[in-house]
Amino acid sequence: MTWPPLTNEMPDLSALVPGQTLVLVLRLAFPGDRTDTYPARLLHVTFVRLVDKAISEYEAARAQMNRYSQEDTPMRPLVALFRAASEFENCITSLHRALCLLEAIRRDKVSPKLPDALRATLRAKADVRNFRDAIQHFDDDLTEGIPQPGGNLGIRAHSNRIECARGSILYSDLAGWLRSLHGYAGQIAA
């Protein structure tokens, strides 16, 4: 596939309700008859916050990809493509952190049981971790002379996926993971 991309095939997640973190924090401030423990509440607040954050970063990347792909000139606004890559870095890092907390929530006796559909998202943790590791260690690789001419320059946004030295993630998969995490975050925040 050619790079840079000419289109943006990122699914739209703008309809997902933002701000579940605020709902959860308010509920925890006025707990009523809640019986969960402080560690569980802290896990829940942080998980919901990171899911909100990852979705916001995804949508920011999508906006930059739209800006880039909708400009039909020989000198497309390349800065939008690089800003999209920055937002993807943040999104993947937040997603990885949320998946780590989801694993802890799954083991927590007080937290709501994970729906079966969410278990598939949790299985993506290793792929997300590898991608996140490539992001986190790219600077080290760069300073140690590991990247080769013609190699991958950090994250590259394509029409249907993001790519790095350790693999790629389809936008459809990323959007699906974020949707499922958002659904569970809504259950926790309710």
Image (spheres, helix red, strand yellow):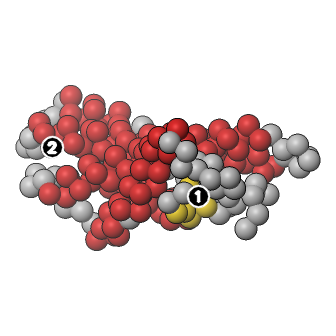
Q: Disc number at residue 72?
A: none
Horizontal side, residue 115 vs residue 183: left or right: left
Type of the residue with mark 1: Glu
**Within 10 angstroms of label 2, few (less than 14), some, or many (20 or more) residues?**
some
Q: Residue at x 14, y 57 (%)?
A: 107
Query: Residue 155, can we see it?
Result: no
Q: Which residue position is annotated with label 1? A: 163
User: Image height check: is 70 above or below 60?
Assistant: below
| Camera-nearest residue between 69 and 17 | 69
Q: Residue at x 10, y 44 (%)?
A: 36
**Within 10 angstroms of label 1, few (less than 14), some, or many (20 or more) residues?**
some
Q: Residue at x 45, y 44 (%)?
A: 137
| Camera-nearest residue between 34 and 67 | 67
Q: Which residue position is annotated with label 2? A: 40
User: Image height check: is 144 above or below 183?
Assistant: above
User: Image height check: is 56 above or below 100?
Assistant: above
| Camera-nearest residue between 172 and 86 | 86
Horizontal side, residue 86 vs residue 42: left or right: right
CA gap between label 2 and label 1 equals 35 Å
Horizontal side, residue 107 vs residue 20: left or right: left
- Which residue, as the protein is rendered here, is positioned at the far front? 145
Q: Secondary structure at mark 1?
A: strand
Horizontal side, residue 130 vs residue 110: left or right: right
Ranked by sequence position, the earlier of labels 2 and 1 is 2
Residue 95 in the image: state x and y as whole percent.
41, 49
User: Image height check: is 123 above or below 178?
Assistant: below
Residue 51 in the image: state x and y as whole percent.
39, 46
Type of the residue with mark 2: Ala
Report the quarter where the N terminus lies: bottom right
